[in-house]
Amino acid sequence: MAIKDSHTEQQIKEAAKRLFFKEGRFKATTQEIADAAGVNRTLVNYYFRSRDVLFDEVLKDAREAMTNRLKTSVGQEDIPFRVRIESFIDVVMEHSLTYPYMDIYIVSRMNDDFNHESDIIANIKKNEDLKMFLKMIEGEMNKGNIEKMEPVQFLLSLMSLLIYPVIIQPLFKKVLQVTDRQYQHLLKERKEIILKTLLK
Amino acid sequence: MAIKDSHTEQQIKEAAKRLFFKEGRFKATTQEIADAAGVNRTLVNYYFRSRDVLFDEVLKDAREAMTNRLKTSVGQEDIPFRVRIESFIDVVMEHSLTYPYMDIYIVSRMNDDFNHESDIIANIKKNEDLKMFLKMIEGEMNKGNIEKMEPVQFLLSLMSLLIYPVIIQPLFKKVLQVTDRQYQHLLKERKEIILKTLLK
DNA sequence: ATTGTGTTTAACAAAATTGTTAAACAAAGA
DNA sequence: TCTTTGTTTAACAATTTTGTTAAACACAAT
């Protein structure tokens, strides 16, 4: 076997993640993915059985990477709440800039997939880390550090403020008539704004 | 000519809006649209030349409807800022609940359409109403009613808090393990939360 | 050198999707 | 009634997309 090329599978995955999650090419074909990876299209079917399986695998990968990054930074013990939130913002913001369309693509696939064929999507569920995070938020509310509300609402607001400006970027650049540079600048400023907005 | 059926075109449009913007079926085929409208598929091509033209027309319709609703409520003269914002929230929230995926679908189409074939998308631009709205926000910042920042950032936050929770609904219902009823309840509560969050 | 294993390719088949054409149809007006 | 106009349908053609198969290939181990 050709050891040098054992990374073909990885190249295909990378290309798929790029097209699906980064460039938001929701209907990228196997041909386009193969082209982006610089390989023969048949290899997509050789390594992954179908386009859907490929999608599910890269989705699983990307979600796991995300979860791990959150665990090792936000999940640390004995750090003050504010630092934890800052950490959360950093990780999610970076992830969101790398793969802006990941979550939206999941939603899009959920909407298409009314037969519930995807195990990966079927297995998305509340995990312990999330429960802990929500508990922590609740604690801060009781301490009076955050406005009181359902902890889930705080999480919703936080995620909204972080992710929406990134996914809506192409449209807002036109609507607001700002250049790419200007918009990137706006995004960078958002961490401080989000902190001020949510942690008064 | 059959007067009774002059609404066929409208039925197709309604079905398209429903599938594209409400149900988030991004890759809905002309057949699916025709089925949803209860008409023969060929009629889609008869009334609209192609799927893309149909998309552009319903997009144009939906955006115009939205703009008009904003104009007649938010755009009124001599109303206090807070009422104006409340009005904005009401209109955008209602629109977002009716057509959650509209903006995202536009973005998705912009990402696909690197040849810039769509006039409707090409013609999206900053309008006077938006400029006025941003000016008004700036004014309130100077009066000290809102945290000072780029007015555009305020708009971004406002839109994020309003729209993201709606589009991410299918995913978050799974992640948070809440029922549809519970999530709808969360969404209803958001108006107050957004007001408290942004207009301290 | 040859065998075996995993990789890559081209050729093929099947299905899905789109758009066109020509004929059938329905109703209104001459 | 007959003609005209606009609507609807079925049949067709073209294209795109997917997935399979079998052969070619490369390399490692024997």
Image (cartoon, coloured by chain):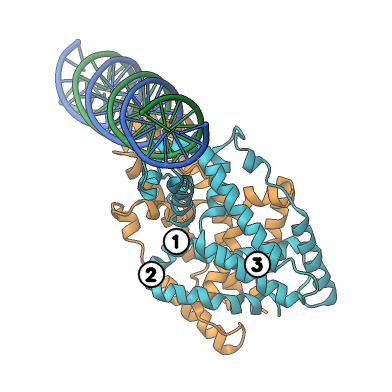
Chain colours: A cyan, B orange, C green, D blue
Q: Percent x, y for residue B32?
A: 45, 32
Whether discs 2 and 3 lie on one chain: the answer is no
Residue type highlighted by circle 3: Leu
Q: Please give left or right for residue B200 compared with residue B15 in the image.
A: right
Name the disc covering residue B67, or none: 1
Question: In percent of the image, x 66 and y 59: which residue is there?
Answer: A68
Whether discs 2 and 1 lie on one chain: the answer is yes
Classed neighbour count for the residue bearing mark 3: other residues with Cα under 10 Å, few (<14), some (14–19), many (≥20): many
Residue type highlighted by circle 1: Thr
Q: Percent x, y for residue B81?
A: 58, 77
Which quadrant holds residue B110? bottom left
The numbered mark, 2 or 1, whose residue comes first in the sequence reads 1
Q: Is residue A118 above or below residue A5?
A: above
User: Looking at the rendering, in which quadrant would you find the N terminus of chain B?
Assistant: top left
Q: Tags 1 and 3 in contact by the CB under 8 Å rule?
A: no
Measured in 3D between alpha carbons, the distance from the residue under mark 2 to the one under mark 3, in whole angstroms, is 29 Å
Name the disc covering residue A158, or none: 3
User: Looking at the rendering, in which quadrant would you find the C terminus of chain B?
Assistant: bottom right
Question: In percent of the image, x 42 and y 31: which residue is there?
Answer: B34
Question: In percent of the image, x 44 and y 76: which residue is there?
Answer: B132
Whether discs 1 and 3 lie on one chain: the answer is no
Q: Is residue B13 above or below residue B184?
A: above
Q: Please give left or right for residue A62 compared with residue B135 in the image.
A: right
Measured in 3D between alpha carbons, the distance from the residue under mark 2 to the one under mark 1, in whole angstroms, is 10 Å
Q: Which residue is mark 2?
A: B127
Name the disc covering residue A77, or none: none
Element assignment for label 3: helix
Q: Percent x, y for residue A57?
A: 56, 44
Element assignment for label 1: helix
Q: Tags 2 and 3 in contact by the CB under 8 Å rule?
A: no
The answer, for residue A81, to whether it is visible in the render is yes
Kindly identify which chain the residue marked by label 2 belongs to: B
